[in-house]
Amino acid sequence: MESRAVKQPTRNPGPAARAANRQPPAAEGRARPAGAVTARTRLGDRGRSWLGHHREMAGEAVRRFLAAPMASGMTALVIAIALALPASLQLGLVNFQRAVAGWEGQPQISVFLHKRAREAAVTSYVEDLRADPRVAAVTYISPEQALAEFQQSSGLGDALAGLDANPLPAVLLVRPQDSAASDLEALAAGLRESALTDAVVLDMAWVERLARLTELGQRLSLGLGLLLALGVILVVVNTIRLHIESRREEILVVKLVGGTNAFVRRPFLYSGICYGLCGGLLAWLLVAVGVALLAGPVAGLADSYGSGYTLDGPGPAYLLGLAGGAALLGLAGAWLAVARHLRAIEPS
């Protein structure tokens, strides 16, 4: 007899069987192959990191500056002396121009009036000149005053006393607002067009001497400033070069781990700014001390001439200009030093 296998009917597995056959999620997670995970950095995080590194490098530059007070102070003092020289010359030029502007010998125009000019017309003409924005002041000298001054200055009082009539006309002394040669010529030409004027005399020799002297001072100040600014940059370049050489091994390690040139350059740039800023502050202090030492003698000299002139010292705007300009020079010097010497430091 043939034995026949009895085919059992297939049944659907129940929920319990399906749960038993299912692998736990932990097993599936352990079965995944391990690999690197890529994450994206947001723009805001990059900006905060960039600013944070700048703050850190600025603080480190200040700490390194204060860690060697003698060497840092000597370098800053050299920068200060180099900046104080052109700054003092520029401030002296400004004080000179202010002193000349209040001096009685400044350019003026002598207007000789017609002898037949009526007094009312002359008075109206003087008022019109005083209202002119190009005119700073007008002084009227009558014929009698002119004759008296001439008698006193010439020593011919007895001879002039015998004259039947006064030969001198009335004179207007016009002090212009601006001492530029072109403006003075234009004002003198306008005065000659008046029907009351007989002659107009303008002392252009004094004006030209003053203009040439002022131009000479300005060019000397500019040339000296450029030359000493170059000296400041060279001082900072040499100082930052020594810093780079002293941190050569540190730079090599930073580059080996992937640090960029901008990352390596940053602390040295802040060191240059620190040297320049301290040098600018010391330069302002030197100029202020110099002005304080000269203020007394200058005031005494002005009093002997009957003037209340005083020296103008370096104010807050001068401080900001010196400190800011010195900081920029320090930054430029540090950039040049890093750009030149950082290329030579590369990991082999």
Image: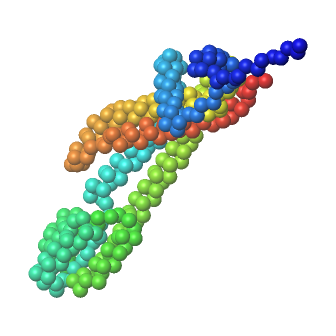
The quadrant in which residue 136 appears is bottom left
At horizontal 46% and vertical 52% (from top left) the residue drawn is 218
Looking at the image, the residue that sits furthest to the front is 1
Q: Residue 33 location in percent, x, y?
A: 71, 22
Task: Name the side, left or right, on which 289 lies relative to 63.
Answer: left
The quadrant in which residue 196 appears is bottom left
Front residue of 278/346: it is 346
Give the answer, above or below, for where 34 lies relative to 226.
above
Where is the N terminus found, in terms of image quarters? top right
Where is the C terminus found, in terms of image quarters? top right
Give the answer, above or below, for where 114 lies relative to 327.
below
At horizontal 54% and vertical 45% (from top left) the residue drawn is 226
At horizontal 46% and vertical 56% (from top left) the residue drawn is 215
Front residue of 243/142: it is 243
Task: Name the side, left or right, on which 174 lies relative to 284.
Answer: left
The answer to whether one can see residue 58 in this image is no
The quadrant in which residue 199 appears is bottom left
Q: Residue 268 location in percent, x, y?
A: 58, 29
At horizontal 30% and vertical 42% (from top left) the residue drawn is 311
The answer to whether one can see residue 133 in this image is yes
Q: How many marks?
A: 0
Looking at the image, the residue that sits furthest to the left is 120
Give the answer, above or below, for where 208 lies relative to 188.
above
Give the answer, above or below, for where 164 lies relative to 101.
below
Q: Residue 224 location in percent, x, y?
A: 52, 44
Task: Name the side, left or right, on which 98 lies relative to 246.
Answer: left
Q: How is the image coloured?
A: rainbow
Front residue of 94/295: it is 94
Task: Name the side, left or right, on which 258 lies relative to 281.
Answer: right
